Amino acid sequence: MRLIFLGPPGAGKGTMAKVLSKSHSLLHLSTGDLLRANIKEKTALGKEAASFVENGKLVPDQLVIEMMRHRLREPDARIGFILDGFPRTTEQAKALDKLLAEETMKVDHAINFDASDGKIIDRLSGRRICGKCGAIYHLKNIPPKQQGICDQCGGALVQRKDDNEETVRRRLEVYREETAPLIEYYERQNLLRTVPGDLDVHELDPILNKILA
């Protein structure tokens, strides 16, 4: 099973990708993790990407595609995968289609997580992350036992800079301009499946399992 998860930031893509990757033994592949891994391991592609990241520039599509190509050739990716955060544009989607065809793979479903702006702002602005171990909390939905302190390691909980309401609204605008056209792209290929991203994990899990059955 090869899946692409689409949707605005805070729509639940990453959370559900983690859930399904465990329940269906699929590789959860996010571009952020892929970039960080290549930079940390100082691969040839990672060194090239680092020069862009250090200068505050976007990593070129071709570099990301090449990283993706190397990763998808690994044995665990051959079983199946979930792409989370890629592609972001129709140009990236076309490049991905070409890459998959060269590797004799194809996408089974492009799943669009449709969530309201209000729900997304509530989710992201209330999110807190442990600066020490990376555990994620939410002020309303998953509060820590002690305010501002991680239950797991005792580290301080912080809000990411891009999780404040003003920044979230800007991120949503960027999504609509750049990424939303992907919905039409995959709809034309009859690969699109839309799910309600406003739902909680336990409500959304059976809906996704039905699509994948």
Image: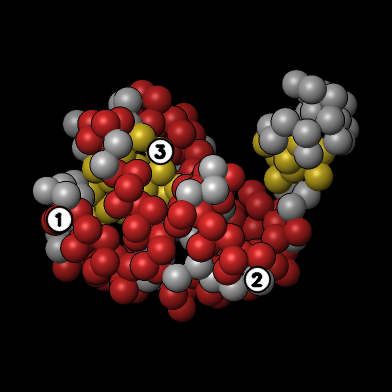
Look at the numbered discs 1 and 3 and tell me whether their residues touch, using CB distance below 8 Å: no
Q: Which residue is rendered at x = 16% and y = 49% of the image?
A: 103
Q: Is residue 30 left or right of residue 149?
A: left
Tell me the kind of residue under disc 1: Glu
Could you give the CA–CA distance between mark 3 and mark 2, rounded to whole angstroms? 26 Å
Q: Which residue is tagged 3? A: 28
Secondary element at tag 3: strand
Q: Residue at x 26, y 66 (%)?
A: 95
| Residue 167 x %, y % | 69, 67
Q: In which image quadrant can residue 161 be found?
A: bottom right
Who comes first in sequence, dot 1 or dot 3?
3
What is the distance, in whole Å, between disc 1 and disc 2 at their CAs? 32 Å
Q: Nearer the viewer, residue 161 or 58?
A: 58
Q: Left or right: where does residue 81 sit relative to residue 126?
A: left
Report whether 207 appears left or right of 179.
left
User: Marks 1/3: CA distance?
Assistant: 21 Å
Vertical order, 11 against 176 (above or below): above
